Amino acid sequence: MAKTRLKSGEFAMELEQDPPLWTDRKRILGLPISFTRYTLTARKLLLNTGLLNLREEEVLLYRVRDVSLSQSLLDRLFGVGTLCVDSSDLSVPHLHLRHVKNPDKVKAALSQCVEQARRKNRIRSTELMGVPDEGEDGLPDDLDGDGVLDNPGDEGVDVAGD
C-alpha cells in the first residue's frame, strides 16, 4: 500500500458534513440585514456572527435541555421571535436565536431534532442534569446517581466511640 504524502492544510480523511435543515439571519424590522446567521443541522445548532472578525458558537443537539420562545408586540407585528436554548454545554450554556422568522415552527423543528439526537446518542434526561452536588469535603454525595448518598459524612455518627 503506497503512502501518499499530505500537503500543508490537507486531511487524510473524509470529513462528514451535515446538510442544513434550517438557516436564517437575525432580522432587523423583519428584514435579514444583519451579520448574525443561524443554522440547524441534524446534529448541532450553529450561531455565526461577524463580518470581518468571525465567531462561531456550536451546541450539540443532544446537550440541549430546554427551548423557550419569547415575542414582544413588535416582534409579532414583524413575524419574528427570539428562541432561548439552554444546554449542558459548558462553553455555551445559553444560546439566543434573536429575531428569527416563524419562531414557533423553528422551535418545533428544533425540539424534534433534539429528541432525535438524544435517541441516536442514547442520552436519557438524567444524564443531562449535570454533576452531582458536592458535599462538605468536596466529593460528590451520590457518585453513581442511584439516589443513595455514597459519601454521607460523619454527621450523627460517632466513629471513635467517644
Image (cartoon, helix red, strand yellow):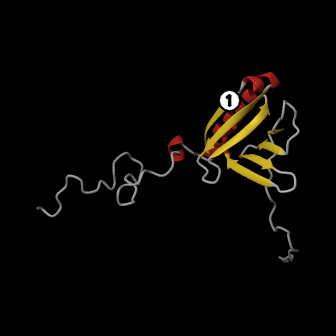
- Say what amino acid the circle numbered 1 marks: Ser
Q: Which of 113 and 88 is in front in this view?
A: 88
Q: Is mark 1 on a helix, strand or loop?
A: strand
Residue 39 visible in rendering? yes
Picture coordinates of residue 75, whole percent (x, y) = 76, 27
What residue is pinned by disc 1?
A: 70
The residue drawn where x is 80% and y is 59% is: 15
The residue drawn where x is 76% and y is 43% is: 41
The residue drawn where x is 77% and y is 25% is: 74
Q: Quadrant of the N terminus?
A: bottom right
Q: In which quarter of the image is the C terminus?
A: bottom left
Is 145 on the left-hand or right-hand side of 8?
A: left
Is 151 on the left-hand or right-hand side of 112?
A: left
The residue drawn where x is 65% and y is 50% is: 92
Q: How crowded is mark 1: few (under 14 residues within 10 Å), some or many (20 or more)?
A: some
Residue placed furthest toward the left: 162
Please identify the quarter of the rendering in which residue 114 is found: top right
Is 59 on the left-hand or right-hand side of 53?
A: left
Residue 120 visible in rendering? no
Q: Which of 79 and 24 is in front in this view?
A: 79
Picture coordinates of residue 63, whole percent (x, y) = 61, 46
Picture coordinates of residue 108, whole percent (x, y) = 70, 30
Please identify the quarter of the rendering in which residue 118 is found: top right
